[in-house]
Amino acid sequence: MHYYFCPICGSKLVEKAAGDDGKVPFCEHCYKYWFDTFSNCIIVMIYNEFNEIVLCKQNYLSDIYYNFTSGYMTPGENAEDSTYREVKEELGLEIQKLDSIGTFWFEEKDMLMHAFIAYVPKAKLTISSEIDEAKWIFYREVPKLIFPDKPGNAMWHMYRAFLKQNKLDQI
Ligand SMILES: [Zn+2]
């Protein structure tokens, strides 16, 4: 998000040089720069000992496609903390092993996605009210069910990383 008015006092911001960052919106009243901001989210692909993956559906996003588990980070958390918390809150699961597989810029939502693969022994899913449906799906069935592959869709990077990491068949 780019700022045009000061979020504190409402004054119109001016463009002012800020070192190597070039010109940045500046409030002459609060004497403060307002750098562009964006949301940070985690996205996690959860697998079990049977190579099943948790897929979630949120009807407001799509009534056809499934997603991995995701959520907004909150201030004070690192991405790992957020991931443990979201997985517990949304699915009632405890992560036993967590691997970071990098970050992805999600253009459509102006969002930085912190992507993880998590191992959780198979257990019943206890879903929160944020999710309409969640289930364990054998990994080979996943490509048919998730949002189509396109640049910016972190799920496909994660799925391919999972196949490689577990020496499973490529698709
Ligand atoms: Zn101000």
Image (cartoon, helix red, strand yellow):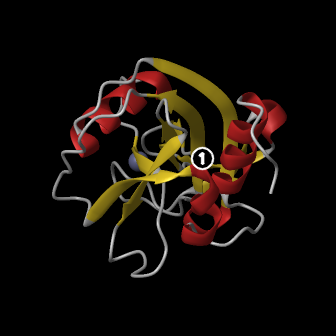
Left or right: 37, with 93 as reference point: right
Q: Which residue is identified by label 1?
A: 112
Q: In this rendering, would 161 be left or right of 96?
A: right
The amino acid at mark 1 is Leu
Identify the residue at image location x=46%, y=54%: 137
Left or right of 95: which side holds 169?
right
Is label 1 in a helix, a strand or a loop? Answer: strand
Query: In the image, residue 114 lies at what x, y percent?
Result: 58, 38
Q: Taking the image as drawn, is residue 78 in sight?
A: no
Q: How many marks?
A: 1
Q: Quadrant of residue 108?
A: bottom right
Image coordinates of residue 71 in percent, x first then y, are 39, 47
- Using the image as rendered, state which of residue 165 and residue 84 is in the foreground: 165
Q: If the image is split into quadrants, where does the N terminus sit?
A: bottom right
Tell me if residue 88 can be seen: yes
Label 1: how many Cα within 10 Å (few below 14, some 14–19, many 20+): some
- Return the residue nearer the eye: 74 or 160: 160
> Residue 49, image x and y in percent?
49, 29
- For the residue pair 7 and 69, the one nearer the viewer reads as 69
Residue at left 36%, top 59%?
Answer: 10
At 64% from the left edge and 64% from the top edge, which residue is drawn? 143
Residue sticking out furthest to the top? 96
Q: Classify 81 as above or below 13.
A: above
> Does 124 sit above or below residue 170?
above
- Residue at 68%, 51% in the rendered image: 105
Position of residue 110 relative to residue 126, above or below, is below
